Image: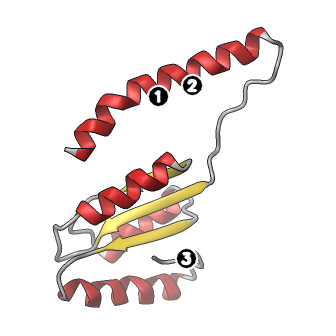
Amino acid sequence: VMKKAVAYLLPFMEEEKARRAAERAAQGLAVEETKGKGVVVMSTVKGDVHDIGKNIVGVVLGCNNYTIIDTGVMCNSADILKACAEHKADILGCSGLITPSLDEMVTVAKEMERAGLKIPLL
């Protein structure tokens, strides 16, 4: 439901950005692309499909000008780290609800360390 609501609102938000850019251009001001506060890669770790918490956090961060890269559910550590590198992530958020998810989160943290990825892990 949340994803459908955001998908519905995106065209309106893009239209508003375009309108503001046109206004700035008409005033002779520079039209800058918004870079936001940073890029957050969010993943539900391997072995878990529960993503409502991740989705809520993603929406809140997105509304606060962070770029959210959602890799989905059941993501292994290699795919998570690949997404971090590909999108030049500033923060990695891992999600899971069931107890075995904790073990996978430890694996992600160890792989981050092994790869020399020095970004905050939430």
* Image quarter of residue 30: top right
The x, y position of residue 20, in whole percent, is 64, 20
The x, y position of residue 7, in whole percent, is 30, 34
Counting other residues with Cα less than 10 Å from the Cα at mark 3, is it few (<14), some (14-19), or many (20 or more)?
few
Identify the residue at image location x=38%, y=68%: 80
Left or right of 97 in this view: 86? right
Identify the residue at image location x=48%, y=78%: 121
Identify the residue at image location x=48%, y=46%: 63
* Image quarter of residue 28: top right
Identify the residue at image location x=43%, y=54%: 60
Disc 3 marks which residue?
120
Camera-side mark, 3 or 1: 1
Between disc 3 and disc 1, whose residue precedes?
1
Q: Can residue 5 be seen in this view?
A: yes
Disc 1 marks which residue?
13
Color theme of the render = secondary structure
Disc 2 marks which residue?
17
